[in-house]
Amino acid sequence: MVLPRNVIDNILRIKKKYLEYRNGEEGEGFERERRQHVEEVNSILRIDELENLDETGLLRLANNLYAFIWWTRKEYLVDYWIKGAGGLDKLRKNLVELLYSDRSLADRFDSFRKNVKGIGVAMITEMLTYFNPREYCIWNKRVREALLKIGVNQLGANLDISRVGISRLSGREYEALIKTLKEIAYHLRDEKALPNPDLLDVHYFLYYIAELSDTLDEEVDHEEIINMVLNIGKGLGFDVSREVPLATGTRVDVIWSTKIGNLGELKYVFEVHVKGSIDSLLVNLMKASQDIAVQKVIAVAVEEELEKIRREASAIKILSDRLLYWNLREVVKASELIDELMSVMQRLGLTKTY
């Protein structure tokens, strides 16, 4: 399959901003973390290690997969995998077959899914990608969402991507997906920033696209952002206030506060920055941080502005362990999720509308 012209144009349009983000502090940190996962997973899944793979090794594997980042009892997960394969020996055998057999990828993928019941598509594709990011890719809801956003509507000659199951991916569909993502990798190349991208780089690009909020296609003003931060705090159960004067002689955009037993009142202070000078923002946050009830001070801005704030704040000792940075895209997303959660609770009758 050759990517349609409109898809290529969309990739090239987003590519510049993506590479800027990737080279920023947040992007570089995420990239380092992912490459550490590649090293860890490869050390676990080497052929000589697989022969003696035990519960400890499987636990290490689970700890390196984002598919299970929210699982607290991963020991239960490991037991589930072993039972799903019919025992540890069979799980080892199926992993060796998946990773090292000469059979086609489609056959290996389908065989593993059939023989190992406890491991789903998200884990298999993430594990394969860390094992060999040149040849394998990750498949999940965000990948499909991002592909549709840039205009990829089909895989191969006749696979409608909107009909490809998130949890029911077949080996044939996986092969077609990999071919498509390799074409995207070709168009992601940049002589200085990304000369030889692999499919983990493509995944990061697609993740970035999936995170882009349509809300930010238009200018979001200071007032809107303040309302979003208030909405999130209220949804999380905090008492929220805006334009609050503090005892330190400054007025801040938003405060979340709560009272906890003998600890008294705890506060989180937010300053929103859209554009212009960041001096007043830093002065306000410095003054706010001197209030003994304030636990953290948070700067809210788009990533480009956050980079400027980080640079300026790095020389201010008083803020070193108090200042957090909140990307505006995350604020928009969190506010939307809070609204969705509140709607669900209201439909269930667990909260009241007034």
Image (spheres, helix red, strand yellow):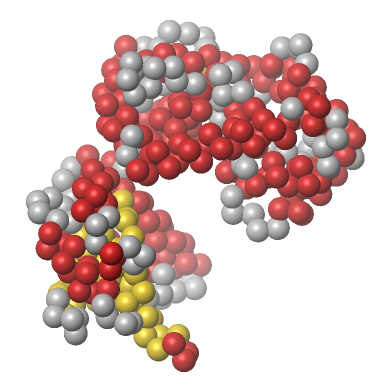
In the shown orientation, is residue 312 left or right of residue 87? left
Q: Which residue is at a point 34% across and 67% down the rendered structure image?
A: 322
Which quadrant of the structure image shows residue 319? bottom left
Which picture quadrant has residue 101? top right
| Quadrant in which the C terminus appears | bottom left
Q: Residue at x 61, y 42 (%)?
A: 65
Residue 61 as seen in the image, left or right of residue 85: left
| Quadrant of res 26 | top left
Q: Name the foreground residue: 133 vs 344.
A: 133
Give the percent coordinates (x, y) of residue 8.
Answer: 33, 16
The location of residue 131, given as percent across then percent down, is 64, 27
x then y, percent, for residue 305:
21, 47
Q: Is residue 243 toward the left or the right of residue 117 in the image?
A: left
Question: How many numbered marks are there?
Answer: 0
**Residue at 27% across / 55% down in the picture?**
314
Q: Judge whether 94 appears above or below 208 on screen.
A: above
One can see residue 319 in this view: yes
User: Where residue 104 sits in the image (x, y, percent)?
Assistant: 71, 12
Question: Outermost residue toward the left?
Answer: 276
Q: Residue at x 32, y 82 (%)?
A: 292
Which residue sits furthest bottom? Answer: 262
For residue 55, above or below residue 353: above
Residue 210 in view of the camera: no
In the image, 307 versus 331, the foreground residue is 307
